[in-house]
Image (cartoon, rainbow, N blue to C red):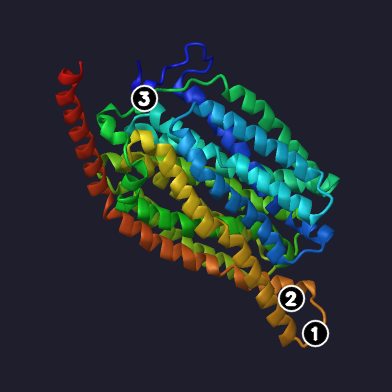
Amino acid sequence: MAPDGLLYNRRAMIKRPWSILSVLFLINLLNFLDRQLPGALAEPIRREFALSDTALGLLSTVFTLMYAAAGLPLGFVADRWHRPRLIAAGASIWSFFTLAGALASSYGVLFAARIGVGIGEASCSPAAQSLIGDLFPQRQRARAMAAFMVGLPLGIFLSYVLGGQIGSRYGWRAPLIVAGVPGLLLAGLILFAQEPVRGAADPHLIGGEGSQRSQFGTLLRTPTLWWIIASGALHNFNMYAVSAFLTPFLQRFHGLGLKEANNVSAVALGAVGVVGMLAGGWIADRLGIRRAEGRILLAAAAMVGGAPLMYLALKVPSGEVLPFMVLMGASLMLLYVYYATVYAAIQDIVDPRSRGLAVALYFFAMYVLGASAGPVTTGWLSDHFAREAMFSARSAEMLETFKAAGLHAAMFIIPLIAGVCALVLYAGSRTVARDIERLRSRSAANTGAAALQSPATG
């Protein structure tokens, strides 16, 4: 019998690690496609329902808060239940609510649909990353995690393509319908995936019964996890702010139409992420072999490079789209390195049977403290600076030029926070080696204790 009483499902049709990873990648792609579409379609949604930028930001905020609230219990479930079935259930739920959003007759209905999408998507990352941790050994884990997380930039890329090509022709509801249907099909496909034995890729980290006790407390006593959580809050503040407002910024400040703005966003926020993610994963695995802190140091270095590039992109004058796209794309390519490096580091520093809970704890904090705050804070700042521009011009009417100026000023908060994130990641690199060694020592002690007890119990 496998550890924890878990057995391989001999009837599973998808058994090879890379085959399972391929299905997980497609599900993750749809995960980010569905969540990003409101950002790609923000301007037509704003105009139809007469919304402020704060209300637009709240659509992303309510999604992330529900994602965080549902994530912790679902992470606990992921450590104890059949993970492919959990992912299938979540994909079905978020796809249903994506389709429901297409039928929204008011802002309130669309708001409620985004709550449902958030609850459904909360099942994906804790269960999927826990699966990947059990399918691939440590020396391959950053590359495997990068392949899974490539679904993030590709999903965002497709959301902008759908938003631009289909949304400009058939309206903002049509892309939601196109995005919702494939999720239901992939939910059925993942049910045929193998459920691996917990800790199969890290047998040296599986101790005795003691390794299952006080999992939550053990995680909270892991310093590197705290630094990673803090970095996640800062980084996802930025990424969700950019995702929510990049297309509106291009439309207002650079004067592009919906289709053209989404084409630029697809490249600057989506396509370049594939390069950052895959290159980051490959380099991170090589650095991780040489030094324990290599992965997190790489993430910190990427932030140091990305922050000034984003600042320079925002300083590009109105109408000069090409230099903006090059600078913003280079910045975001570096920022995407974060996901391949830090997500793999989480798997390295926690017990294999606590991985789902660790990812859920990380996601809870980063979404509540970061991702949920990014869009609404940026939207609030945009409204504030727009009113200042209106008052400075002594105008009685809020013109689109004031909204453009307000959003432009608000987005300068993003490179500032990226710089702070680099410092936090560097601090995390100083503790990771001790936490890995502490985990190995604790596992070895539990194994020894179990060996001493076995004759008496047998």
Q: Quadrant of residue 452?
A: top left
Kind of residue at disc 1: Ser
Q: Position of residue 116 (x, y in %)?
A: 67, 44
Q: Nearer the viewer, residue 313 or 5?
A: 5
* Label 1 vs label 3, nearer the camera: 3
Identified at 52% across, 44% down, the residue is 71
Q: Mark 1 highlights which residue? A: 395
**Alpha carbon separation for disc pair 1 and 3:** 68 Å
Disc nearer the start of the sequence (2/1): 1
Query: Sequence-wise, which precedes: disc 1 or disc 3?
Result: 3
User: Residue 370, how many percent across, how many down?
Assistant: 52, 59
Residue 259 position within the rendered picture, expressed as x and y whole percent measured from the top left = 76, 51
Q: Secondary structure at mark 3?
A: helix
Residue 178 visible in rendering? yes
Which residue is the site of mark 3? 4
- Residue shown at 63% from the left, 27% from the top: 186
Question: Pointer 2 and pointer 3: residues touching (CB < 8 Å)?
Answer: no
Secondary element at tag 1 = loop
Q: Residue at x 37, y 45 (%)?
A: 216
Q: CA distance from mark 2 to mark 1?
A: 10 Å
> Pointer 1: residues within 10 angstroms few (<14), some, or many (20+)?
few
Nearer the observer, disc 2 or disc 3? 3
Q: Which residue is mark 2?
A: 402
User: From what the image shows, is residue 42 above or below residue 113?
Assistant: below
For the C terminus, the quadrant is top left
The numbered disc on residue 362 is none
**How much space separates mark 2 and mark 3, taking CA atoms?**
60 Å
Res. 149 visible in picture: no
Amino acid type for the residue under numbered disc 3: Asp
Label 2–label 1 contact, CB within 8 A:
yes
The N terminus is located in which quarter? top left
Q: Quick one: SS at disc 2? A: helix
